[in-house]
Image (tube, helix red, strand yellow):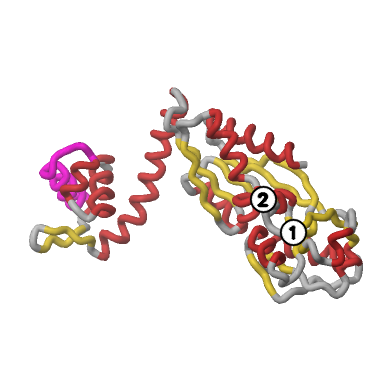
């Protein structure tokens, strides 16, 4: 299938105008119109309805756009990789992460990376941890970051860091004066919980059960940073990863180690059998440097 036809189709679909598409593609309006007609003939589909010299996508056109966008995203990625290999000027890093990594690790890691490569771009997508393997294997992402274990033959996994969960409490709370908090000290406390299905929720429930306590609360949230905000408002206590706890340091909270310690592991994940660009490797270095500075 002709790549220029697909690019013309995408431009007209997104911009809603042959004129605007021709400007974006640095070509003429007749050339864009011809590419669209040729694509429709090739597919045997009417992709746009033509009314009063205006084009509007048909139902078939909308369906085809979703599939074409996947193919063109891969083509765009190839172009980015080639540019990355040459100079890293304008190179584009696409990262998919879970909530915890997005708020706790990504900003600082990106700052280090962009200080080294100021002309690079970083795009972040936050996905459910249960879907991240699919997005890394099939989506237009260079690297993923989330909890371990994440086992899938389509991706390569590297341990980033092993860390320990920490308790966040309001400064006025009875436990704020302790150097560390035993889980048994949380008897009778309401917790702000990770959302159902979250790996952290299962791990922490097991930790509480090991000391004979229920892991209960009136609020649950998919974001550890959001949990810290709920704690500041007095809606419970929260146990979060140390990177998110650091990100929440501007809130009126204190952070305390917990005993017995509960570990959390983060990993970096890459599409299997795909070469890693210089920018991807630099991101790994920047991320490792940041997590080492926190622990």
Whole-number angstrom distance, CA of label 2 to CA of label 1 = 12 Å
Which residue is label 2 attached to?
Answer: 247
Residue 159's spot in the image, x, y percent?
71, 41
Residue 1's spot in the image, x, y percent?
27, 43
Which residue is label 1 attached to?
Answer: 253
For the point 35% across and 56% down, the residue is 66
Residue 275, relative to residue 151: is it above or below? above
Q: Dot 2: few (<14), some (14–19), or many (≥20) neighbours within 10 Å?
A: some
Which span is picked out in magenta? Answer: 25-42
Disc number for residue 112:
none
> Disc count in the image?
2
Look at the image and tell me whether residue 169 can be seen. Answer: yes
Look at the image and tell me whether residue 159 can be seen. Answer: no
Residue 208's spot in the image, x, y percent?
85, 66
Determine the image quadrant of residue 64. bottom left
SS state under label 1 = strand
Query: Along the horizontal axis of the image, is 205 left or right of 93?
Result: right
């Amino acid at each position: 299938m002709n790549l220029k036809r697909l690019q013309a189709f995408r431009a007209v679909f997104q911009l809603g105008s042959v004129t605007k598409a021709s400007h974006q593609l640095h070509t003429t309006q007749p050339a864009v119109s011809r590419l669209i007609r040729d694509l429709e003939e090739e597919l045997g589909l009417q992709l746009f309805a033509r009314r009063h010299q205006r084009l509007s996508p048909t139902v078939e056109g909308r369906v085809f756009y979703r599939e074409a966008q996947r193919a063109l995203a891969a083509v765009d990625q190839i172009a980015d990789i080639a540019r990355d290999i040459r100079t890293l000027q304008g190179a584009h890093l696409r990262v998919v992460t879970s909530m915890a990594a997005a708020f706790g690790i990504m900003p600082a890691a990106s700052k280090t990376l962009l200080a080294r490569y100021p002309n690079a771009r970083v795009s972040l997508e936050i996905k459910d941890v249960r879907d991240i393997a699919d997005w890394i294997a099939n989506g237009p992402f260079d690297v993923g970051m989330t909890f371990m274990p994440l086992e899938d033959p389509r991706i390569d996994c590297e341990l980033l860091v092993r860390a320990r969960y920490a308790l966040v409490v309001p400064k006025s709370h009875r436990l704020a004066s302790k150097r560390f908090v035993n889980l048994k000290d949380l008897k009778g406390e309401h917790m702000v919980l990770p959302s159902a299905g979250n790996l952290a929720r299962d791990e922490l429930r097991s930790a509480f059960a090991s000391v004979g306590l229920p892991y209960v609360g009136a609020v649950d949230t998919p974001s550890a940073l959001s949990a810290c905000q709920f704690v500041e408002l007095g809606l419970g206590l929260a146990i979060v990863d140390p990177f998110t706890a650091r990100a929440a340091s501007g809130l009126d909270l204190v952070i305390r180690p917990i005993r017995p310690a509960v570990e959390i592991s983060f990993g970096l994940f890459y599409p299997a059998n795909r070469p890693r660009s210089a920018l991807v490797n630099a991101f790994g270095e920047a991320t490792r440097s940041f997590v080492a500075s926190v622990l």
